[in-house]
Image (cartoon, rainbow, N blue to C red):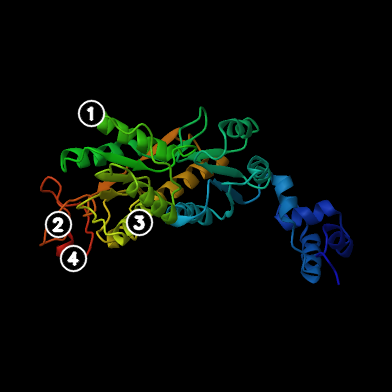
């Protein structure tokens, strides 16, 4: 059985022309007589020849592919970012290579290999070091970074992690009077989480309070939130409010607290980050911060495509806004006529549709 399809040489032999002529006909280039073109197209059809993607890539220095490098691929946040990126890639006729670099010992080599197979790379977060990114940029690989601090000369897209966290923690301190708060999440190699921690610290300093010396480190997963809750329950003095680095941690936290009879928010208030689809349906509904994950992916892809096409000036940095979404888990009551959480007598700006058990906040 034949292992490979027909080659360019076989088509040329069948049509009685050079391989250069076959290549020009296949790509629709050059001045070719009608008779020769007809003969070559007939040979292509007879042999069912498909031009090599890699051959076109060598000639045009294009692959029709975008690469995207993530720290990991778990959870609704990453799927939303990928979806947004994919929408723009497909609209541009590009395919997608995805690399999850978390815990990958050969991550740098994998990224270098991806750079040889893609027209440009989007690199997310802090898993890939600055030195490698700058090395790729010096090789003229089109790169857009996202969800991290900007590097000189490399376009970047991120969301505002600092201001919304500052606003949320300020709300917990001033509106609810909480004085002992804990931040749960890993800030090492996680630029987004680091900015959230800094907002957490600033809110304490602005209120004349001393923040914890460091976060309670936790992976950004439901099971890690459960483990963090068990750790907090063993503390000699429990925090009055827990600011979680994402909604998955918060979900594991609230479910574990409920399982041992600790009432949220009466005994411990809990907040999240991301405004995941499930956040409004937890018990109680989760106070969190909405970030435009899908728009993050779309904006990154748009900038990368413009960079590849050398289509005018590409913005150096785009910062997408975020918004605190106040629900019941922080201790706010709900307006019974609208079911919106009230903060300073103002409802949320969009409908939540949460069904609240009035006894939860009684």
| Labels 3 & 1 near each other (Cβ < 8 A) | no
Name the quadrant containing residue 255: bottom left
Task: Note whether residue 80 is visible.
Answer: no
Q: Earlier in the sequence, mark 3 or mark 1?
A: 1
Marks 2, 4: nearer the viewer: 4
Say which residue appears at 76% left-offset and 53% top-offset. Answer: 24
For label 2, the residue is: 334
Q: Quadrant of the N terminus?
A: bottom right
Relative side of 91 to 289, left or right: right
Q: CA distance from mark 2 to mark 4?
A: 10 Å
Residue bearing the label numbered 3 = 251
Residue labelled with disc 4: 357
For residue 206, the mark is 1
- Whole-angstrom CA distance, mark 2 to mark 1, is 28 Å
Q: Earlier in the sequence, mark 2 or mark 1?
A: 1
Q: Element under label 1?
A: helix
User: Residue 245 appears in which quarter of the rendering?
Assistant: top left
């Amino acid at each position: 059985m034949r292992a490979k399809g027909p080659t360019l040489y076989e088509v040329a032999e069948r049509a009685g022309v050079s391989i250069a002529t076959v290549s020009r006909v296949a790509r629709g280039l050059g001045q070719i007589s009608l008779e020769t073109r007809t003969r070559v197209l007939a040979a292509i059809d007879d042999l069912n020849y498909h031009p090599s993607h890699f051959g076109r890539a060598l000639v045009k220095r294009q692959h029709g592919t975008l690469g995207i490098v993530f720290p990991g691929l778990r959870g609704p946040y990453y799927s939303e970012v990928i979806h947004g990126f994919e929408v723009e890639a497909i609209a541009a006729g590009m395919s997608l290579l995805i690399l999850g670099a978390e815990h990958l010992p050969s991550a740098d080599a994998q990224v270098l290999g991806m750079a040889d197979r893609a027209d440009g790379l989007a690199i997310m977060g802090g898993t890939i070091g600055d030195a490698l990114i700058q090395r790729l940029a010096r090789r003229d690989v089109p790169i857009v970074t996202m969800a991290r601090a900007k590097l000189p000369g490399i376009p970047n897209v991120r969301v505002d992690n600092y201001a919304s966290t500052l606003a949320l923690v300020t709300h917990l301190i001033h509106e609810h009077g909480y004085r002992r708060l804990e931040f749960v999440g890993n800030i090492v190699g996680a630029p987004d989480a680091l900015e959230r921690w800094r907002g957490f610290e600033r809110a304490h300093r602005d209120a004349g309070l001393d923040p914890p010396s460091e976060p309670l480190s936790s992976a950004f997963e439901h099971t890690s939130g459960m483990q963090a809750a068990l750790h907090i329950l063993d503390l000699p003095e429990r925090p009055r409010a827990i600011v979680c680095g994402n909604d998955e941690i918060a979900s594991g936290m609230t479910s574990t607290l409920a399982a041992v009879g600790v009432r949220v928010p009466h005994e411990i208030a809990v907040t999240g980050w991301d405004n995941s689809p499930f956040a409004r349906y937890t018990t109680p509904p989760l106070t969190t911060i909405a970030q435009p994950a899908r728009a993050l992916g779309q904006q990154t892809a748009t900038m990368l495509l413009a960079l590849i096409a050398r289509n005018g000036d590409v913005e150096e940095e785009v910062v997408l806004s975020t918004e605190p979404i106040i629900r019941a888990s922080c201790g706010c009551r709900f307006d019974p006529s609208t079911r919106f959480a009230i903060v300073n007598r103002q409802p949320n700006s969009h409908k939540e549709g949460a069904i609240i058990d009035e006894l939860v906040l009684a």
